[in-house]
Amino acid sequence: MGRRLYSTLFWAFVALSSAVLFPVALLLWALTLPFDPRRRLLHFFTCFWASLYTWLNPAWPVTIGGREKIQSDRASVMVANHLSLLDILVLFRTFAHFKWVSKVENFRVPFIGWNMSLNGYIKLKRGDRASVLRMMEACEKALAQGSSVMMFPEGTRSATGRLRPFSPGAFELALRTRSPVQPILIRGTREALPKRGFVLQGRHPIHITVLDPIPPESFEQLSAQELAQHVRTLMAAALGAPDSKRARL
C-alpha cells in the first residue's frame, strides 16, 4: 500500500512538473532557434528537467562512471542496454548532447512528448520500413551536423536483465557515417521500476557506466551484424553476463 501511494505521488509530480516546465522549454526553443539550430541549450534544459526525477527521489540514487569518455568534440552513435522506463531519465543525467531515437508513440505524450519534438529527437514507427528509412536519414543528418545519436539496439526493454539480441541499425549507421560507437551500460533500473507496471519498487541504486568509445577505424571492415555482435559482447562482458565471450576485432 505504501509503495502504491508513493508511486501515485511520484507520477503526479511528474505530470504537474511537466505541465509547468513545458512552457519554459517552449520559450527557450523560440528564443534560441535563430542561433542554436542543434538545440543544444534546449537539450541541456531537458537534461535538467529529466534529472529532477532522480535528484529529488531518494529511492533512486544515481552514480555515473566514465562520464569523461563521452567525446564532446565528435558526434557518435551512442548505444545503451534497455531495462526500464527509467533508462531514459537516467541517461539524461550524463548531460551529453544527443538526439534520441524513440518510438513515435512517445512523441504523443502531453508535454514530455511535445518537448521531444521541440528538441528534434528522431521518431521511429516500429515495423514500418519507410519510417526506418526516414529515421536513418534523420540520424545521418544529425551526425553530420555534430549531434550524437542515442539508441537502444535491443529495441525493447529486457524483462530478465540479460542483454537481448542487438538489431544492426545503429551499427549500420556508424559504418555509413564513419562515426564512433559509444557503449553505455545501465544497472539497477529494472529493479527500481520493472518493465510491466508503474509501481516504484523501493530503494534501488542505479549505476551508469560509460565504456571506451570504439573508433570507426577499428571496425570499418566489419558488417553491421558483425559490429553489433562485437559491441554486444563487449557490453555483456562489462556487465558480467554469463553468455559473454571475449570480444576482439
Image (cartoon, grey):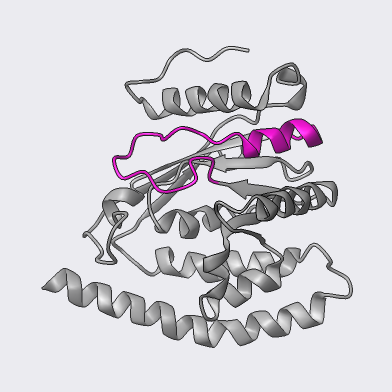
On screen, residue 123 versus residue 90, left or right, reads right
Task: Give residue 208's position: percent from left, percent from top.
Answer: 46, 44
Q: Nearer the viewer, residue 194 or 126?
A: 126
Q: Is residue 61 above or below residue 50?
A: above
Farthest-out residue, right: 34
Which quadrant, please, contains the C terminus? top right
Q: Nearer the viewer, residue 107 or 92?
A: 107
The structure residue drawn at horizontal position 42% and vertical position 81%, both measured from the top left corner, is: 15
Which quadrant, please, contains the N terminus? bottom left
Q: How many marks?
A: 0
Q: Nearer the viewer, residue 94 or 141?
A: 141
The structure residue drawn at horizontal position 32% and vertical position 54%, both measured from the top left corner, is: 195
Task: Give residue 155's position: percent from left, percent from top.
Answer: 49, 45
Give yes or no for residue 175 being in the magenta stretch. yes
Q: Is residue 201 above or below residue 210?
A: below
Q: Is residue 122 above or below residue 119?
A: above
Task: Give residue 241's position: percent from left, percent from top.
Answer: 35, 25
**Residue 21 appearing in the image:** yes
Q: Is residue 155 above or below residue 30?
A: above
On screen, residue 50 versus residue 191, left or right, reads right
On screen, residue 53 versus residue 118, left or right, reads left
State the extent of the magenta-drawn residues as a range: 152-179
**Residue 70 appearing in the image:** no
Task: Give residue 66's position: percent from left, percent from top.
Answer: 55, 37
User: Picture quarter containing residue 192?
Assistant: bottom left
The structure residue drawn at horizontal position 62% and vertical position 56%, both measured from the top left corner, is: 100
The secondary structure making up most of the magenta span is loop
The structure residue drawn at horizontal position 80% and vertical position 36%, both measured from the top left corner, is: 177
Give yes or no for residue 6 being in the magenta stretch. no
